[in-house]
Amino acid sequence: MRWARSPEPDSHAAVAVTVMDDLRQHADYLGQFAKARVPVLWRPLHEIEGGWFWWSDTKTPENTAKLWRMMFDNHEGH
């Protein structure tokens, strides 16, 4: 799946809703591990500069950067 643009966090597009729901779920799980003092090696958006996954956009890296920022902002809020 390639996006013409990264989904906006406030968008009601089905893709944006799904991505944001997944990010919230990840943040919740990571928060539970943190409270239990369980060390976690978590590698979101792995191989981000490769271009072979849907989240790595080598033609428009601003899209990938925006997705990373959305994820970071979501997790910082938990």
Image: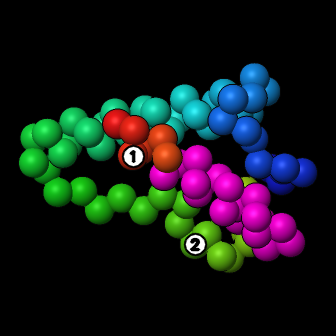
Residue sitting farthest toward the top: 12
Residue type at numbered disc 1: Glu
Residue 24 placement (x, y as % from top left): 46, 33
Judge left or right: residue 17 versus residue 33. Answer: right
Q: In terms of depth relative to the viewer, which is nearer, 25 or 61?
A: 61
Query: Which residues fall within the magenta stretch?
Result: 56-72
Q: In terms of depth relative to the viewer, which is nearer, 39 or 64?
A: 64
Above or below residue 49? Residue 46 is: above
SS at circle 1:
helix
Residue beneath label 2, please?
47
Nearer to us: label 2 or label 1: 1
SS at circle 2:
loop
| Observer able to see residue 21 | yes
Residue 11, quarter of the rendered image = top right
Residue 55, quarter of the rendered image = bottom right
**Residue at 36%, 58% in the rendered image:** 42
Residue beneath label 1, please?
76
**Residue at 65%, 53% in the rendered image:** 67
Other-residue count near label 1 (Cα within 10 Å), few / some / many at <14 / 14–19 / ≥20: few
> Which numbered disc flags the more N-terminal residue, 2 or 1?
2
Above or below residue 25? Residue 40 is: below
The verdict on residue 65 being magenta is yes
